[in-house]
Image (cartoon, rainbow, N blue to C red):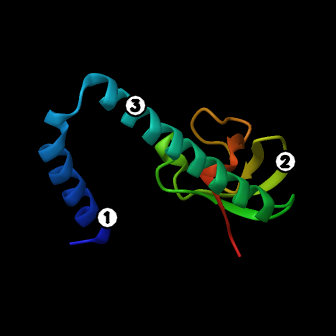
């Protein structure tokens, strides 16, 4: 059993035991806090990647990005914009990216060494 599945199992058991005690307002507050935490973590991760990547650096699309056919694809950073990078795909044009370039959030990229 992986660490992630163990955490999920424990969290599910905890929620099953305690959700009945919570009011709708408390559940909404919990969901709002979880969403804010997730967004904050995503921003921190994107900021780290943004500062690691420079124009000309090779990068790979992470697993979990969409469209799925981009997962694992590699490319080169050709332009940096505020919260996104323009990536020229090594494989060339694919799917809806007929120019062979993708403007994507930094959070969907990882730097290749």
Looking at marks 2 and 1 on the same chain, the residue that comes earlier in the sequence is marked by 1
Q: Position of residue 91 (x, y in %)?
A: 65, 54
Q: Secondary structure at mark 1?
A: helix
Looking at marks 3 and 2 on the same chain, the residue that comes earlier in the sequence is marked by 3
Tell me if residue 24 comes above or below residue 83 in the rendering. above
CA gap, disc 3 to disc 2?
A: 36 Å
CA gap, disc 2 to disc 1?
A: 33 Å
Q: Position of residue 30 (x, y in %)?
A: 37, 36
Residue 48: numbered disc: none
Task: Tell me what residue is drawn at x 15 percent, y 53 percent.
Answer: 13
Q: Quadrant of the N terminus?
A: bottom left
CA gap, disc 3 to disc 1?
A: 24 Å
Looking at marks 3 and 1 on the same chain, the residue that comes earlier in the sequence is marked by 1
Residue 29: numbered disc: 3
Task: Check disc 2 and report the residue beneath it.
Answer: 80
Q: Position of residue 113 (x, y in %)?
A: 71, 76
Q: Nearer the viewer, mark 3 or mark 1?
A: 3
Q: Nearer the viewer, mark 3 or mark 2?
A: 3
Task: Check disc 1 and report the residue beneath it.
Answer: 4
Task: Tell me what residue is drawn at x 65 percent, y 54 percent.
Answer: 44
Residue 3 falls in image quadrant: bottom left
Residue closer to the observer: 22 or 62: 22
Q: Is residue 82 left or right of residue 91?
A: right
Task: Tell me what residue is drawn at x 80 percent, y 64 percent.
Answer: 57
Q: Position of residue 63 (x, y in %)?
A: 48, 56
Residue 60 falls in image quadrant: bottom right
Q: Residues within 10 Å of mark 2 (few under 14, many from 20)?
A: some
């Amino acid at each position: 059993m992986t660490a992630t599945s163990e955490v999920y199992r424990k969290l599910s058991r905890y929620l099953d035991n305690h959700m009945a005690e919570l009011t709708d307002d408390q559940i909404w507050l919990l969901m709002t806090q979880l969403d804010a935490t997730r967004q904050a973590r995503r921003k921190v991760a994107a900021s780290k990647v943004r500062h690691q990547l420079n124009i000309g650096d090779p990068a790979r699309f992470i697993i979990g990005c969409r469209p799925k056919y981009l997962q694992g694809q590699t490319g080169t950073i050709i332009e940096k914009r505020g919260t996104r990078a323009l990536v020229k795909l090594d494989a060339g044009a694919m799917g809806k990216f007929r120019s062979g370039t993708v403007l994507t959030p930094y959070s969907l990229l990882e730097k290749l060494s």
